[in-house]
Image (tube, rainbow, N blue to C red):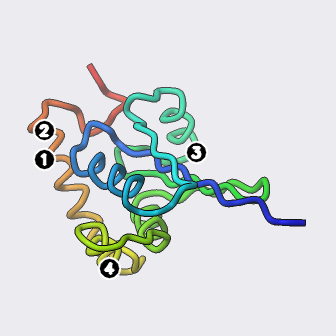
Amino acid sequence: MKPQPVRLQLVFDGGCPFCHGFAELSELKGRLPQLEIVDGRANDQLRQALKAQGHPLSEGAVLVVEQDGDTRLFHGPAAVALLCGQLRPSAGLLGLLKMVFASRKRTERLYPLLLWARCLALGWRGLPTDPDHQS
């Protein structure tokens, strides 16, 4: 019996321009047809379900990996590293991001800077850093 293809779902904070840009590039240029991107800020039900499982979007994106009936969740730096390791970009910015963030160890070291940049960008846009505290 043939294994079912892997389904990848990246749930990100759509209010963050960096997160949005990364998700969009991954979907459009990453050559992963099984990748679906979801704006978690706009999807209250999914965002709350992930938070209840210990994966709040305020602390990073979540990568949902489904294969053969098994679902695994990767959060924050683990999600970014796993997704970057799967990308097959031809060149450009996504190729650079893959080189930098495909290493889990490097991603874990750099991730606090990404969260800091996210906080700044959301502040400039007048959005709360925690999507669950939207006004």
4 vs 1, front mark: 4
Alpha-carbon neighbours of circle 4 within 10 Å: few (<14), some, or many (≥20)?
few
Find numbered disc 1 in the image and state the secondary structure of the residue it sits on: helix
- Do callouts 4 and 1 mark residues in contact (Cβ within 8 Å)? no
Alpha-carbon neighbours of circle 2 within 10 Å: few (<14), some, or many (≥20)?
few
Find numbered disc 4 in the image and state the secondary structure of the residue it sits on: helix
46 on left or right of 93? right
Q: Quadrant of residue 122?
A: top left
What type is the residue that disc 4 sits on?
Answer: Met
Dot 2 or dot 4: first in sequence order is 4
- Do callouts 1 and 2 mark residues in contact (Cβ within 8 Å)? yes
> Label for residue 53?
3
2 vs 4, front mark: 4
> Label for residue 120?
1
Disc 3 and disc 1: Cα gap in Å?
27 Å
What type is the residue that disc 1 sits on?
Answer: Leu
50 on left or right of 135? right
Q: Nearer the viewer, residue 22 or 91?
A: 91
Q: Quadrant of residue 13?
A: top left
Residue at 76%, 59% in the rendered image: 4
The residue that label 2 is drawn on is 123
Disc 4 and disc 3: Cα gap in Å?
30 Å
Residue at 35%, 44% in the rendered image: 58
Dot 4 or dot 3: first in sequence order is 3
Image spot of residue 94 (x, y percent): 30, 67
